[in-house]
Amino acid sequence: MNPASDLGSIDWTLRTGGRLDAGERRRLIADLVGVHARNAAGRLGMLVHLNSGRRAQVSPERLMPPDSALTRAAEAAAVQRLPATLLNHSYRTYTFGMALGELEDLDVDAELLFAAAMLHDTGLTVTSGADDFTLASARLASEVAEGVGLSTRASQTLQTAITMHHSPRVTLAAGAVPYLLSAGAGVDVVGLRSWELPRLTVAAAVREHPRDAFKTYFARAWMAEAARVPQGRAQLLRRYGGFTAAIRLAPFNE
């Protein structure tokens, strides 16, 4: 990646601490416009019962996380560090991301996606420092990857998925793992692309991993992150993306 195209990657986040320059801010605001338009159209489709998810099918067996040294280590690290509300969000993020991948017939490394989902928000529990929270998450992911002997390339993919996931628009060009991690988190946090998923898939994920007042918890955590890194993406999403309102209006009860 070159500096013009690696916005959100682990290399970019290490270099900048997650702080945006003026050009990067303009680029992400433009991305937000497209995301808002897509979300509005999709949510309208849900209201009039035209959402594509009503006609979709995803086998529950395909959404089961793989059992490996990496997934066990990532899950253990997440359980140790995350409150139940964020831990359940991490599980749902994986389920929703995998389900979207199944519907798009994507070839994705499920181990990396699960590990990324488990660890992507661990940095939100960090309340000090001036860097984007995903940098702390990625550093933990790097430690987990090193502990199980993951290749350098796979570790870079894992870390970039984590640091990139809350950019407004992550495309498949970034790779299947970053793309589906961002998509899965987007479903759970603001309902983005939720209309593409079968109701049974969504209901099962929430039943197995309850939300437990997730909207309230996450809105407060995001506000704290935005205040801590005022030049970062969290603040951009709050200021230009109506993120607090989007969390509240997500198609979940709590």
Image (cartoon, rainbow, N blue to C red):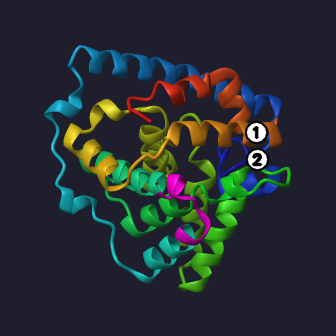
Rendered residue at 60%/48% (across/down): 164
Classify residue 177 by image quadrant. bottom left
Mark 2, residue position: 18
| Magenta span: chief secondary structure | helix
Q: Nearer the viewer, residue 129 or 20?
A: 129
Q: Give the Cα separation between the discs numbered 1 and 2.
A: 6 Å
The percent coordinates of residue 150 (x first, y second) are 53, 80
Q: Is residue 208 above or below residue 217?
A: below
Question: At which x and y percent is residue 65?
Answer: 33, 67
For image coordinates 61% across by 27% down, the residue present is: 244
Expressed as whole percent of the image width and height from the top left, the position of residue 157 reads 55, 63
Whether residue 39 sits left or right of residue 139 in the image: it is left
The tally of labels here is 2
Where residue 170 is drawn, which disc sits there?
Answer: none
Residue at 55% over, 79% down: 151
Could you classify mark 1 by the number of other residues whose Cα lies within 10 Å: few (under 14), some (14-19), or many (20 or more)?
Answer: many
Secondary element type, mark 1: loop
Within 10 Å of disc 2 (Cα), the crowding (few <14, some 14-19, many 20+) is many
Element assignment for label 2: loop
Residue 31 position by quadrant:
top right
Pick whichever, 88 or 171, lies toward us. Answer: 88
Report the side of 54 relative to 118 (left or right).
left
Q: Position of residue 117 (x, y in %)?
A: 48, 58
Residue 232's mark?
1
Q: Is residue 101 visible?
A: no
Residue type of the residue flagged with mark 1:
Gly
What range of the chain is rendered magenta?
A: 79-87
- Three-letter code for the amino acid on which mark 2 is drawn: Gly
